[in-house]
Image (cartoon, coloured by chain):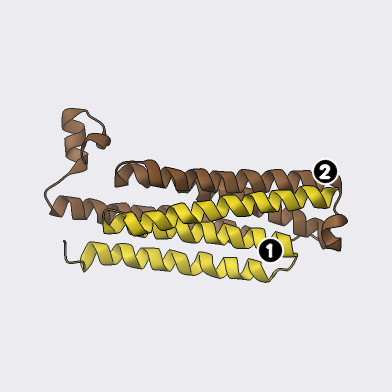
Chain colours: A brown, B yellow
């Protein structure tokens, strides 16, 4: 592809570093999703990919398209703003639902945590 | 030279994101409760969005960007709807 070959070397190195960093963070978050024991620990892990991982990939995309099309491309900012505002809302509603379900079944992770001063890990 | 570097980085990050999607899919299949599955689906669509952006860089067209934008918009609605369903309408197993 000719557009890739015309890219200056520093831009190729910067784009590659941002891409590998972003996808590595997404992979780390997904492995954390597999390895943590309880739901309340698990919900922390994927936010790694949806904040810094997403920003790195978006920055790589902005850099690449700005240089190959020789004009600033800022459409990616839209995705960044949207995902940054919606991910906390989503996870707050999800944790609220999970807490409601746990309390409905008679298990309350929050109160037992404060009473016994143990970690959430011992509950399940 | 710069093309070779970028192609290797694109392949590596596609592999990483595919593995991340596989991990999220495994959590959807195995998740002990419904909220784990919803969380796995949320992770899956964020990873798919990143993979589409990487494809867009690789192919040089802006078509993939619009697909990523649509996935970002619809995935939020889907996850919020399922969380609300878990809170209100689910028969607790």
Q: Relative to B72, does residue B15 appear above or below in the rendering?
A: above
Q: Residue at x 65, y 68 (%)?
A: B64
Co-location on one chain, circles 1 and 2: no
Q: Residues within 10 Å of mark 1 (few under 14, many from 20)?
A: many
Quarter of the image where the C terminus of chain A is located: top left
Q: Residue at x 26, y 32 (%)?
A: A119
Going by the image, does A119 lie left or right of A52? left
Q: Which mark is residue B56?
A: 1
Q: Residue at x 61, y 63 (%)?
A: B52
Residue A60 picture location, percent across and down = 70, 51
Going by the image, does A41 lie left or right of A3? left
Question: Marks 1/2: CA distance?
Answer: 20 Å
Q: Relative to A11, does residue B34 appear above or below in the rendering?
A: below
Subunit of mark 1?
Answer: B
Going by the image, does A15 lie left or right of B68? right
Q: Relative to B82, does residue A49 appear above or below in the rendering?
A: above
Furthest residue toward top: A117
Furthest residue toward left: A106
Quarter of the image where the N terminus of chain A is located: bottom right
Query: For numbered disc 1, what is the local secondary structure?
Result: helix
Q: Residues within 10 Å of mark 2 (few under 14, many from 20)?
A: few
Going by the image, does B5 lie left or right of A31? right
Residue B84 picture location, percent across and down = 29, 65
Q: Which mark is residue A10?
A: 2
Query: For numbered disc 2, what is the local secondary structure?
Result: helix
Subunit of mark 2?
Answer: A
Decide if residue A78 is in sight here. Answer: no
Q: Which mark is residue A2?
A: none
Q: Is disc 1 in contact with disc 2, using a CB cutoff of under 8 Å?
A: no
Residue B47 picture location, percent across and down = 52, 56
Residue A113 picture location, percent across and down = 21, 34
Q: Residue at x 27, y 36 (%)?
A: A121
């Amino acid at each position: 592809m000719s557009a890739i070959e015309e890219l200056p070397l520093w831009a190729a190195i910067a784009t590659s570093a941002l891409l590998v960093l972003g996808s590595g963070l997404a992979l780390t978050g997904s492995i954390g999703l597999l390895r943590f024991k309880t739901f309340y620990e698990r919900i922390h892990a994927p936010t790694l990919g949806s904040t810094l991982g997403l920003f790195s990939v978006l920055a790589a995309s902005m850099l690449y398209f700005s240089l190959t099309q020789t004009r600033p491309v800022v459409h990616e900012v839209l995705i960044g703003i949207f995902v940054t505002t919606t991910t906390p809302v989503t996870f707050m509603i999800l944790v609220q639902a999970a807490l409601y379900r746990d309390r409905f079944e008679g298990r309350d992770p929050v109160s037992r945590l404060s009473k016994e001063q143990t970690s959430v890990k011992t509950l399940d | 030279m710069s093309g070779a570097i970028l192609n290797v980085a694109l392949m590596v990050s596609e592999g990483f994101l595919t593995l991340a999607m596989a991990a999220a899919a495994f959590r959807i299949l195995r998740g002990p409760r419904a909220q784990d599955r919803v969380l796995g689906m949320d992770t899956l669509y964020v990873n798919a969005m990143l993979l589409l952006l990487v494809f867009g860089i690789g192919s040089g067209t802006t078509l993939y960007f619009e697909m990523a934008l649509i996935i970002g918009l619809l995935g939020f609605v889907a996850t919020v709807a399922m969380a609300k369903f878990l809170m209100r309408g689910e028969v607790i197993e």
